[in-house]
């Protein structure tokens, strides 16, 4: 087996780091204490959070929009715009009493009509909502300050999916939600601590403090509790080049890097002028084309799993152990309600010789195998290069197929476009939302065992029973069905200069409760 050495940063990043390290102390800010500048690494395609799972939109718009429920630092679901939550005895409905006196950015008070319209729109747009709550789920008003979710059957993950920060159910005025075009809303009015001022495409997104904001009284915890806009104006500056981001942080042009490059992590964490934080962001997996091609039998997929060395893959893709975790489980290690290590004896074995023997016994005789990846994403590309070498050591006749995001996305929807593909799977609130365990993607094929388990999980009497079912399901997935190879969990990295205070991260940067000053 080849032992991969740790990959260092690109030459450009090294040159930049060396140059900056000679600049001395952090330069003075180029703006006032009432302006916060955040370098955002990509241009959002939309600011309508109900329309997308993309991180740039999420990082910006969760300051503008809020949700009925959210998650605290321990990933527990708690009220946000709701004041109280009541579950029915048969677990098919939830009543949400609303906080009174909460106003939208246009001055109107939030009522049940706004919440029903917003949640009804989200139900239509979100695949996760449909999957967990059911296609027949409805939200209805119960007076001006209460809303009821009605489902055909119990769903243990109902509150969890409503608390998601990935394509989250943003609450907006009823008229905006009801009249939204298929391409999304064009008026972005929420209840959050900041309101939208201007979006200059390819330049910046300007938010300003909402003076009429109604904050919760609880202490801040994750996304929960009190949210205060302590800085008047926030600018999310669109800066796609990591070198420019880093230079701007050094000079004081930017106060925060929303998502720092992994190539610059070592330099940032060792710099006395910066605070670097990381947060679990998702999993690196290799998904099999189960419906077509070489890996249509569990025995072949089991063989490949045996031969994969996840340690080498994650080390090459991310370089520093601070920004990844090796783990066998399909759920995040941050989710104690769901994370389990069952089936771990099949993980990170790296036995390529035995894997090759198993492949031949399973009927593989040198057929061409296409490994698909995206060259615009460094960690996916690097992980694919390592996997390709490991597959070759197993005797697999593998070719690496690469493309930009547009090409990769198109090929990933082609049932004949590949045999294995890299994927970065962002965190979900319960296992029934894991896309590669369903059948919605053209190359995925849901096992009847898993389909039955998911139904039982959603209908379970309580979370303990649901977890017990999931533990056995993951064991089956890892030991028998093997829809994906789990490489490990990666972390996002945010960096702030030393005069940013109160800045926290959870699934990305949290801007509220942040201040600026030399203290």
Image (cartoon, rainbow, N blue to C red):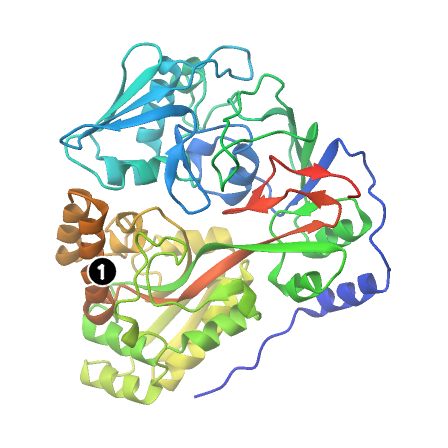
- The local secondary structure at tag 1 comes to helix
**Is residue 137 placed above or below 141 in the rendered structure?**
below
**Is residue 30 placed above or below 489 in the rendered structure?**
above
Where is residue 183 shown, x and y percent of the image?
45, 28
- Image quadrant where one finds the N terminus: bottom left
Horizontal side of 333 relative to 192 (left or right) equals left
Where is residue 155 shown, x and y percent of the image?
21, 38
Horizontal side of 461 relative to 207 (left or right) equals left
Give 108 or 422, whichever is nearer the viewer.
Answer: 108
Q: Which residue is mark 1?
A: 471
Q: Label 1: how many residues lie within 10 Å, few (<14), some (14-19) or many (20+)?
A: some
Q: Residue at x 77, y 67 (%)?
A: 15
Give 331 or 219, whichever is nearer the viewer.
Answer: 219
Where is residue 66 shown, x and y percent of the image?
47, 28
- Image quadrant where one finds the C terminus: top right
Residue 127 visible to the viewer:
no
Horizontal side of 250 relative to 187 (left or right) equals right
């Amino acid at each position: 087996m080849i032992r991969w050495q740790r990959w260092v940063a690109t030459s450009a990043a090294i040159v930049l780091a060396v140059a900056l390290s000679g600049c001395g102390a952090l330069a003075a800010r180029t703006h006032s204490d009432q302006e916060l500048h955040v370098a955002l690494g990509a241009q959002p395609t939309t600011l309508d959070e109900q329309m997308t799972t993309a991180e740039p939109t999420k990082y910006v718009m969760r300051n503008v929009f809020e949700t009925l429920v959210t998650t605290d630092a321990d990933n527990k679901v708690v009220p946000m715009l709701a004041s109280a939550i009541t579950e029915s005895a048969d677990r098919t409905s939830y009543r949400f009493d609303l906080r009174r006196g909460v106003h939208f950015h246009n001055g109107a008070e939030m009522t049940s009509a706004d919440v029903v319209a917003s949640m009804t729109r989200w139900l239509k747009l979100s695949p996760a909502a449909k999957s967990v709550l059911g296609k027949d789920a409805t939200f209805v008003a119960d007076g001006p300050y209460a809303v009821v979710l009605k489902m055909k059957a119990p769903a243990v993950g109902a509150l969890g999916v409503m608390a998601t920060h990935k394509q989250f159910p943003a609450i907006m005025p009823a008229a905006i939600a009801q009249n939204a075009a298929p391409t999304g809303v064009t008026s972005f009015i929420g209840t959050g601590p900041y309101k939208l001022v201007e979006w200059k495409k390819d330049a910046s997104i300007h938010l300003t403090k909402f003076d009429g904001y109604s904050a919760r009284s609880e202490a801040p915890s994750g996304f929960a509790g009190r949210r205060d806009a302590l800085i008047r104006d926030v600018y999310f500056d669109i800066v796609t080049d990591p070198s420019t981001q880093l230079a701007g942080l050094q000079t004081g042009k930017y106060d925060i890097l929303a998502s720092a490059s992994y190539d610059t992590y070592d330099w940032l964490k060792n710099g006395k002028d910066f605070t670097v934080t990381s947060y679990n962001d998702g999993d690196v997996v290799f998904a099999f084309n189960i419906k077509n091609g070489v890996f249509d039998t569990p025995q072949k997929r089991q063989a490949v799993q045996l031969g994969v060395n996840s340690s080498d893959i994650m080390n090459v893709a991310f370089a520093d152990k601070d920004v990844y975790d090796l783990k066998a489980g399909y759920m995040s290690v941050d989710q104690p309600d769901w994370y389990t290590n069952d089936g771990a004896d099949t993980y990170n074995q790296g036995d390529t010789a035995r894997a090759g023997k198993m492949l031949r016994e399973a009927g593989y005789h040198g057929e061409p195998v296409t490994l698909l990846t995206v060259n615009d994403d460094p960690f996916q590309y690097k992980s694919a290069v390592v996997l390709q070498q490991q597959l070759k050591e197993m005797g697999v006749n593998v070719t690496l197929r690469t493309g930009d995001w547009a090409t990769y996305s198109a090929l990933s929807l082609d049932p004949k476009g590949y045999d294995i593909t890299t994927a970065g799977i962002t965190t979900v609130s319960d296992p029934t939302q894991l896309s590669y365990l369903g059948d919605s993607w053209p190359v995925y094929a849901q096992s009847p065992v898993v389909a039955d388990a998911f139904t039982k999980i959603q209908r379970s009497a309580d979370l303990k029973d649901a977890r017990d079912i999931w533990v056995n399901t993951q064991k089956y997935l890892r030991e028998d069905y093997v829809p994906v190879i789990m490489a490990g969990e990666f972390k996002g990295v945010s960096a702030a200069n030393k005069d940013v205070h109160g800045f926290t991260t959870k699934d990305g940067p949290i801007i509220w409760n942040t201040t600026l000053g030399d203290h």
